[in-house]
Amino acid sequence: MPPGCENGRRFVFEGEGNQRPGMEPGPVVYVAAALKHPIFTRTGDHLVYAAKIPLIDSLCGATLRIPTLDGRHLSLPVTEIVNTGDRKIVKGEGMPRADGQGKGDLVIVFDVLFPRTLTPAQKALMRASFFFPGKNPPATAHAAQVAFLNAANHGTHGWTLGYSK
């Protein structure tokens, strides 16, 4: 099979079929049938990769490590908030084109995974994070910011550090 061969492509070999005395041999016809890949789906020359990421990474960013068909791994930084169904395109990392002129693209489709449950402490941290002080906060807001960061980094122990009335 040539690189980039599409599903359903027909290969015809004239005169290579069954032979009988007094008859010309017919053609042999092969039809390419693509096997399902465990990681990618194909759309023309493009490969589609479903990236399952946890909610926290969809909000705060992460670096995805995506395998390629040729054994490499791509490091793809996700720096913006992504929602389920959002797409990111990596040019030239898809299937080889049948005409030999480069490759298609890798299309990453995001699937955001939400937690099934949250503890009361996790819920409180989530609620608090949306009211986090901005730039140049007053002293009391700064103390709350330090307490929040300590809590986020050290569990419930952090709530008693860095915050004073």
Image (spheres, rainbow, N blue to C red):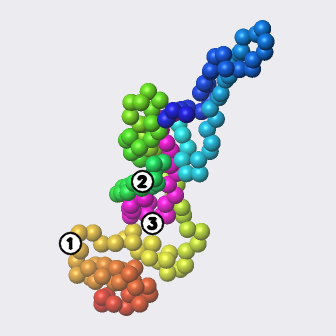
Q: Give the range drawn in magenta.
A: 44-65
* Residue at the (39%, 30%) spot, across then down: 101
Work out how far the residue at label 1 is from the one at label 2, CA to CA, in angstroms: 44 Å
Please tell me which residue lies in front, 110 or 151.
Answer: 110
Q: Counting other residues with Cα less than 10 Å from the Cα at mark 1, is it few (<14), some (14-19), or many (20 or more)?
A: few
Task: Choose the circle earlier in sequence order: 3 or 2.
Answer: 3
Percent of width and height locating residue 16: 67, 20
* Residue at the (71%, 20%) spot, across then down: 17
Work out how far the residue at label 3 is from the one at label 1, CA to CA, in angstroms: 25 Å
Is residue 38 toward the left or the right of residue 60 in the image?
Answer: right
Is residue 151 toward the left or the right of residue 140 in the image?
Answer: right
Q: What residue type is labelled 1?
A: Asn
Residue at image mark 3: 56
* Residue at the (55%, 51%) spot, across then down: 39
- Give the quadrant of residue 161: bottom left
Q: Counting other residues with Cα less than 10 Å from the Cα at mark 3, is it few (<14), some (14-19), or many (20 or more)?
A: some
Question: Can you tell which of label 3 and label 1 is closer to the viewer?
Answer: 3
Give SS at disc 3: helix
Work out how far the residue at label 3 is from the one at label 2, CA to CA, in angstroms: 27 Å
* Residue at the (54%, 47%) spot, across then down: 40
Q: What residue type is labelled 2?
A: Arg
Task: Choose the circle earlier in sequence order: 3 or 1.
Answer: 3
Q: What residue type is labelled 3?
A: Ile
Residue at image mark 2: 72
